[in-house]
Amino acid sequence: MTSLSKTYRPTMSSADPPLSFSPSSAAPIRHTLHSGYVPLFLRLSHTCLSSPHPPPPVPVLAPRSSYLHVCCAEALESLSECAVQSSLGAWFVDHSGGGSDQSPLRWTVPVGVLFDGRREKSSLPWTLEVNFGRYPA
């Protein structure tokens, strides 16, 4: 018999609390994870403006477990009225850090993960620039 076939059995001392997990004990954790929100301000990019005056930023309270295009659909619709090429789709850029980084935010990543990944540069509300037009290559 090889050593790989032996099963590992951790030993517990009498001072260790008993391990217990039940679906009912996970409910508060699940509620905390899924009830969080990230406040956003969506601004229309100056390259997409159809008028000399930009529209005011649109505030959005985005669920952390949602995606930008889903939770910002109504805001995108209102901003598209002021954009030149709104039929090509929207993409988001984070300019809250003050840098010149023009890389778009990934639309396949939940809002909470995007925000946490940029936490050192971001403050609340998180200001995102909305671009309508061709996605950068």
Image (spheres, rainbow, N blue to C red):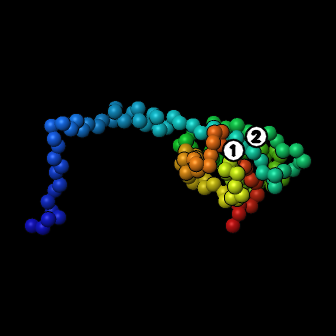
Pointer 2 residue: 57
Task: Tell me if 83 is positioned left or right of 20 in this view.
Answer: right
Label 2 CA crowd tier, 10 Å (few <14, some 14–19, many 20+): some
Q: Judge left or right: residue 97 versus residue 49.
A: left
The quarter holding residue 47 reads: bottom right
Q: In the rendered view of the protein, which quadrant contains the N terminus?
A: bottom left
11 and 83: which is toward the camera: 11
For residue 137, above or below residue 129: below
**Is residue 110 visible to the viewer in this orientation of the structure?**
no
Q: How far across and how far down the image is residue 113, in percent?
A: 53, 48
Q: Amino acid at mark 1?
A: Thr
Q: Residue at x 53, y 43 (%)?
A: 65
The residue under the point 33% across, 35% down is: 23
The residue type indicated by label 2 comes to Pro
- Cα gap from disc 2 to disc 1, whole angstroms: 9 Å
Q: Quarter of the image containing the C terminus?
A: bottom right
* Labels in figure, total: 2
Q: Secondary structure at mark 1?
A: strand
- Residue 17 percent location from the top left of the image: 22, 35
Q: Which residue is mark 1?
A: 127
- Front residue of 55/90: it is 55
- 8 displayed left or right of 80: left
Q: Secondary structure at mark 2?
A: loop
Q: Nearer the viewer, residue 16 or 130?
A: 16
Q: Are marks 2 and 1 in contact (CB under 8 Å)?
A: yes
Residue drawn where x is 47% and y is 38% of the image: 33
Across and down, in percent, residue 48 comes to: 81, 53
Residue 37: quadrant of the picture = top right
